[in-house]
Image (cartoon, rainbow, N blue to C red):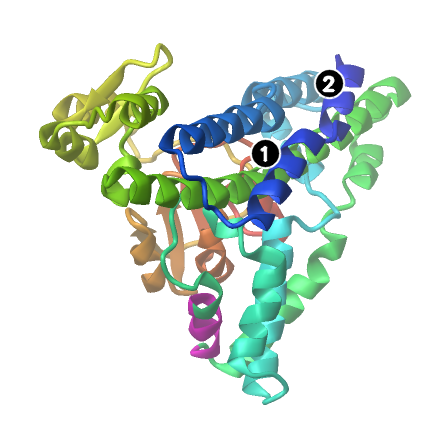
Amino acid sequence: MLKQLDLYIKKPKNRLINMLQEISSEKISLDSSLETVERIASLQYTALGEIYGINLVQIEHGLKWAMEQLLLEEIPKEDVRKYIPYLLGSEKATIGVIAEKTALALSIKVSEKKLTLREAEKEYLSKYKNLNYAYGAVKKNNVAAEKLKYLIETPLKERIQLFNKLDNLTDCNKSNSLVDKIIRSHEIRDKLIKLNDIAIKVGDLRDKNKALMGQVAYQRNRLLNNLASLTGEKRENLSRYMLFELFELAENQKRLSEETINLRYDYVVLNRIENCLIGDKAREATLVVDFKTDKNDQIKGTTASMGNVKGYVKHVRDISDLNYITKEDILVAKGTDFNFMDAMMKSKGFITEEGGILSHAAVIARELKNPV
């Protein structure tokens, strides 16, 4: 199984990459709305097939369980949870941290008059323009400009300190040395090192997949803009159409009712049998987390990065809330992504509802040596 997983990790995504290059190099001038939807469908299914061929979340849980079972043969049960986050520390920076380091370096150059803001924006966009599209959000404004302006408003001394912190994170965690220290059995040690190496690669793959999905979302947005101009449907409304409904719009000019559109603006849940829940029914379906507290009023969860911090809780409900995160805060959110990086750099630690030990929040926390 590990050999098959290693092959999957290394598997090239040439078909999707070639499709993205083809779409990005051409001017979107498709005259047929049906042809446009067919291109959207082809891009969507190619992306799902090549990026999400298997469920990495379940692989992640399996790797964690296997490592825990091996550790239990050598160390007390109460110490197992403590060592897992240390074992998963990678010595290779993820793309999110690399992008953040680049943005900091460019903002410093702008402040030192070595680059203009426009030159810095162009350089950042040439490498990372698709990161903020990782979950399909449509960005109408210049993301690079907003990011660099935000950083420039931060005191130069603070930015230099943050840059130096990131620059020193390449030597994150000597996980294999830790295995040598705590495990006596050579057989168990070798298995742990092999599992750990695979787990780190899986975490890195998830990060790369999200960046690639950002490119898909960017090109899909261009195609939807073209479809809006051909059909006369509002562009923002098209984001509330399911794929088969886009085909019906293109072939039969069948539009969704204003009532349906408004309900989908309000709330949507797509479950595994593709039954679309909207409005209050969708809201009720997502209320599945029961936050039960013990006698000490503590909320418990899985630790993905060890540490002990005290700070003010800031609950991020909307992306705009990130502007209020300070270095005294603990960031609380449903989950994190590349557009959370500025706030994650500042905060003392993170708490997320979603994600496991190889999630974006977990990987970044271990890189920054923040608890999560």
Q: Position of residue 41 (x, y in %)?
A: 46, 26
- Furthest-bottom residue in view? 113
Q: Is residue 191 left or right of residue 222?
A: right
Query: Which range of residues does the magenta coloring cover?
Result: 146-153
The amino acid sitting under disc 1 is Leu
Displayed quadrant of residue 193: top right
109 or 242: nearer the eye? 242
Where 64 falls versus 163 (above or below)?
Answer: above
Query: What element does badge 2 sit on?
Result: helix
365 magenta-colored: no
Q: Mark 2 points at which residue?
A: 70
- Furthest-left residue in view? 259
Mark 1: few, some, or many residues within 10 Å (few <14, many ≥20)? many
Displayed quadrant of residue 297: top left
**Residue 174 is at least partly visible in this image:** yes
Residue at the spot 59% in from the left edge and 79% down from the top edge: 108
Q: Mark 1 points at which residue?
A: 358
Q: Considering the whole magenta stretch, tell me its main secondary structure.
A: helix
Residue at the spot 27% in from the left edge and 33% down from the top edge: 240
